[in-house]
Image: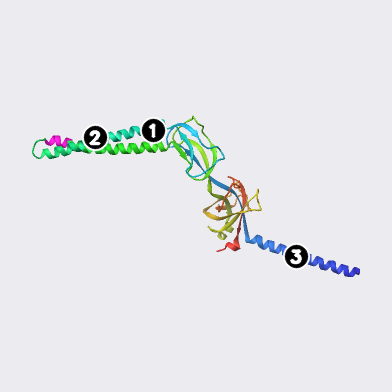
Amino acid sequence: MSKKAIAISIVIALFFITAIWFAYNFVKQEENQNWLTLYGNVDIRDVSLSFRVSGRILSMDVDEGAHVKKGQVLAKLDKDTFIANLEMAKAQLEQAIANQKNASRTYKRREQLVDNGAVSKALFDDAVAMKDSSSAEVSVAQANLEKAQISLNDTEIHAPTHGTILTRIQEPGAIVNVAEPVYTLAIDNPVWVRTYIDEPFLGKVYPGQEALVYTDSNPEKPYKGHIGFISPQAEFTPKIVETTQLRTDLVYRIRVVIDQPDNGLRQGMPVTVKIHLKANSQ
């Protein structure tokens, strides 16, 4: 092959390579224009768990990091005092019912005798008052019994939902007051991402719009999610959040709900959110 032919071949090859390069970059640019990229952090709600009554802790049944199910017993107080109060309330109710029956019999007997003058009006009025008073005592005793039963039930802490124990604050033998924290529970679901969007892009996103969430630990496996909330109020970008614009710009907070969260998402984890504008445009 002559040198001229070789030169022509090289020129043609370079032309095609250049054309392919420009085409590739054009496609990538189109793709980038169709995707909105945001940066944020995983936000997992947590709840402080405590007893509704005071007492001495009998047992702490789970440790930090344990996955718990809704309704699972997590801790117990010593129940002896509460059981005794319940038995006393039962006895008081039985006594009140007995007094009510006696007062009712007295009332009926005097009611029959007051008309013919065998019993004075004053004694009959006393019987009426005793009957009403005994009925009120029964109501009070029933309320006290229900309260004692509730207090006994409150000697146990149950998981309000599925979650993971973040902190175990108390230990068996400790005396705790009402509402004093015992555990901190991280709620498994929902899990969302808190991110921020610049005002020029606000009209391109809406609640329910699909999103992909990428983590640094597993960037090849994004989480599917959707926009659950867009703040109606603008704010300055928090320092902990990176944006493609200046930090002093006004932005709007967005909550992206993860559809199927797992243990790969941790509180505060930095993530990248991508929204396909063309596919999701209204």
Helix, strand or loop for disc 2: helix
Q: Give the quarter of the image for residue 90.
A: top left
Residue labelled with disc 1: 83
Residue labelled with disc 3: 20
User: What amino acid is labelled 3 in the image?
Assistant: Ile
Q: In the rendered view, would you say 93 is above or below 247?
A: above
Label 3 vs label 1: CA separation?
82 Å
Q: Give the range drawn in magenta.
A: 120-126
User: What amino acid is labelled 1 in the image?
Assistant: Ile
Other residues around mark 1 within 10 Å, as few (<14) / some (14–19) / many (≥20): some
Q: In the rendered view, would you say 131 is above or below 207?
A: above
Q: In the rendered view, would you say 74 is above or below 22?
A: above
Label 3 vs label 2: CA separation?
100 Å
Residue labelled with disc 2: 99
Asked whether 167 or 241 is in front, the reply is: 167
Residue found at the far right of this picture: 2
Q: Decide which of tag 1 and tag 2 comes sooner along the chain.
A: 1
Q: Are marks 3 and 2 in contact (CB under 8 Å)?
A: no
Helix, strand or loop for disc 3: helix
User: What amino acid is labelled 2 in the image?
Assistant: Asn
Helix, strand or loop for disc 1: helix
In reply to whether residue 123 is colored magenta, the answer given is yes
Residue drawn at 30 percent across, 33 percent down: 92
Q: Decide which of tag 3 and tag 1 comes sooner along the chain.
A: 3
Residue drawn at 36 percent across, 32 percent down: 85
